[in-house]
Amino acid sequence: MKAAVAAPRPVQRKSLGKRMRDNWQLYVLLLVPVVITIIYKYGPMYGIQIAFRNYNPGLGINGSPWVGWKWFERFFRAPNFDRMLWNTIKLSVFGLLWGFPVPILMSLMLNQLRFKRLKRTVQTVIYAPHFISTMVICGMLRIFLSPSGGLINLIAGTQIDFLTEASAFRTIYIASGIWQEAGWGTIIYLATLSSIDPALYEAASIDGASVFQRILHIDIPCLLPMIILQLIMSASGIMNVGFEKAYLLQTDLNKATSDIIAIYVYEQGIVSARYELGTAVGLFNTAINIVLLLIVNRVAKKYGEVNFV
Amino acid sequence: MTVLSRRKQGQLGGLSDRTSSIILVVFSLIILLVVAYPLYYVLVASFSDPYDVYAGKTFFLPSQATLDGYKAVFAEPNIVRGYGNSILYTVVGTFFSVAMIYLVAYPLSVKDLPGKKIVSIFFIITMYFGGGLIPTYLIVQKTGIMQTIWAMFLPGGVAVSNAIITRNYFENSIPGSLKEAASIDGASHFRIFFSMIIPLSLPILSVMVIFSMVAYWNDWFTALIYMTNEQAPLPLVLRNILIKSSASASQASMISGGYAELNKMTEMIKFASIIVAAAPMLIAYPFVQKYFEKGLMAGAVKG
């Protein structure tokens, strides 16, 4: 090292081998994460092939016989296939339609708030639900929605058992999702808005622009790239409906709307140990997501200034 | 506000600054109330007699204030054990996750590391594509970590999106000249990593620590599929109480007052256990809140 410093620095670029040797310590740092990723992320990818085999643990993955599309066909012929597919899509798409605009509106509003202490307080409070476990949220929902003395029924003066009403499930799922995550979703928008040059606002208000006009002509154009980026990201995860909440809020009586593909994967794959079927259904989900991602990636390329990955 | 601007507002349409200011404040207070009230309600209920809660007597203040709910929670061996398990998984898991994030983020932030692009792609692929639940489960089985603490965090691998945020933070917020000066002075990459990068990145470190902590503290599904009942973390223990609403045998034997008393106790435990489970994270996050914006922004905008 010392000698290298003393020597005159070479003008031309160092050779690849030299640069690799110089940086060997960086490869050492990367070693453990790479090995863990190979085993626990790429290992399962290799295991996906059991979706096309009759998996026999004794014979191993490679020894098990191929069965083609058998497990996919079984899934498509499952008595509830249509219901699960549509419930998954509806829960996800409606969740996006209702949930997506809320953090945007909230951050536009908070950004214009002139009382900084109030703004900070609101921010702290609206982040809170994000830090609570789905289990606890669902416990609270069950308490609030209870027919005998639950908060909602107390306020409304009714005695409805919401969790046994199939028609109420999606509303419960989506509304509680907004309650939990909308506040957290404002962070990225507020950060974007805080980069706006204050001189713009000053100029606008000297020209007599109202708060609403400032939002319309300064804030929204500034947010637009970020809004598009966020929309793209969420659109490509349409099939990733949260398993946890649907599973914890499901009752025998609301299955008509709460039965989703992710629950089927868990029940078939883990509970009933039908590994091939579970894998096939999981792959089906992933495939749809990948197709959406590719479509969306196309769209994203048009917005080159936004860094996608 | 200048006189000029006030004069012009009328003509340009829209509301005066004063009116809109009031509207904004009112809306903010409504949001505040909608988000905070459910949490406040549970907090109040946890100190109240459950029958009064269900009779609608505890909208604002506790009724027949009592600590019995909390006493019952901490007298419940399953909950206490779950708490212990949760703390263990959170501490070990957070250490693991943050270490992984840093080990990936630093090398990928170094300018001319040969193979950097390939390594980045290698990690980013796992963000968008994975084997799914069952193949992962089979690998966990095969590698023999089922029902060990390793199963709680190894299958999660590297939190790639957090590693990208951290890498961008290194690139944007730690001056390249500093690293250069250190390496000209003969500091190795290890040395730069441990005595420069880590101490200089405490804001993003604290954000990553809190993100990881929250993920482990709130996780129950991993434990549901990989762990035994004795190893269940707190949220999974609470499933029986909150979701299945079943009283445990130990509670039943503790109570002498018969079914009504047991029922009351079960309800009290619900409220108190929600508070007990949610409190640690709700107390922790405000301390690093000021770094959230900066940290997440660093992830979205590449320097």
Image (cartoon, helix red, strand yellow):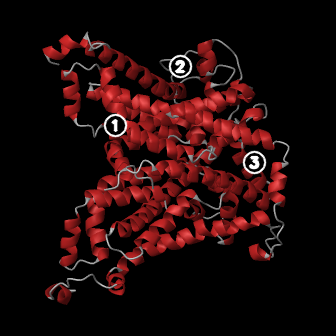
Which amino acid type is marked by label 3? Tyr
Q: Secondary structure at mark 2?
A: loop
Q: Same chain for the residues at labels 1 and 2, yes or no? A: no
Query: Can you see residue B57?
Result: yes
Query: Can you see residue B261?
Result: no
Q: Which label lies toward us, 3 or 1?
A: 1
Answer with the quarter of the image where residue B3 lies.
top left
The residue beneath circle 1 is A222
Q: Secondary structure at mark 1?
A: helix
Relative to A153, is A229 on the left or the right? left
Which amino acid type is marked by label 1? Cys
Q: Same chain for the residues at labels 3 and 2, yes or no? A: no
**As rendered, which of A133 and A16 lies closer to the eye?**
A16
Q: Which mark is residue B106?
A: none
Which amino acid type is marked by label 2? Gln
Relative to B272, is A60 on the left or the right? right
- Residue A269 point in image, percent of width and height: 75, 56
Q: Secondary structure at mark 3?
A: helix
